[in-house]
Amino acid sequence: MRTETIASENSPSALTEEVAPRSPWRVTEVEALPGFRLRVAFADGLKGMVDMSRMVHSPKAGVFAALTDPSLFAQVTLDYGAVAWPGELDLAPDAMHAAIQENRIWSL
């Protein structure tokens, strides 16, 4: 996970001090699973699943239709606390967190 740097006034050592993002909905871990599912963990310790199987196969999938390629789906990464894929595809971590907090799964 990438970290952000914050400099304090009059403190040269602060230029290299790493500060972890504090937003509870930032994704800290992601793992691609079979069936177009993801296992995710958040900064606040919440863990859950994202099921994208219906969305990627939907006629309304739009740019996410590319994820029907299992090799592309497996290239999931984290980009500043958001789940992302090559081609500038990403998921909203705050909406994901809210759904998983309520249901333990986010079905798209």
Image (cartoon, rainbow, N blue to C red):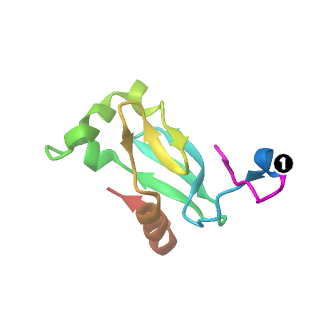
- Say whether residue 57 is magenta: no
Q: Residue at x 45, y 70 (%)?
A: 98
Looking at the rendered structure, the secondary structure element under dot 1 is helix
| Residue 57 pos. (x, y %) | 23, 41
Q: Where 100 falls versus 68 (above or below)?
A: below
Q: The magenta stretch spans which residues? A: 1-11
Q: Quadrant of residue 99?
A: bottom left
| Residue 26 pos. (x, y %) | 56, 58
Q: Where 49 falls versus 78 (above or below)?
A: below
Quadrant location of the C terminus?
bottom left
| Residue 102 pos. (x, y %) | 47, 75
Q: Quadrant of residue 95?
A: bottom left
Count the marks: how many? 1
Question: In this view, which residue lies farthest toward the left?
Answer: 59
Q: Residue at x 27, y 49 (%)?
A: 54
Amino acid type, label 1: Pro
Question: In this view, which residue lies farthest toward the bottom?
Answer: 102
Number of other residues with Cα within 10 Å of mark 1, as a class: few under 14, some 14 to 19, many 20 or more: few
- Say whether residue 3 is magenta: yes
Quadrant location of the N terminus?
top right
In this image, 54 relative to 100: left or right? left
Which residue was labeled with disc 1? 12
Q: Where 62 falls versus 26 (above or below)?
A: above
Give the overall secondary structure of the magenta segment.
Answer: loop
| Residue 69 pos. (x, y %) | 33, 27
Question: In this view, which residue lies farthest toward the top?
Answer: 71
Q: Quadrant of residue 68?
A: top left
- Closest to the observer: 105 or 22? 22
Q: Residue at x 36, y 58 (%)?
A: 107
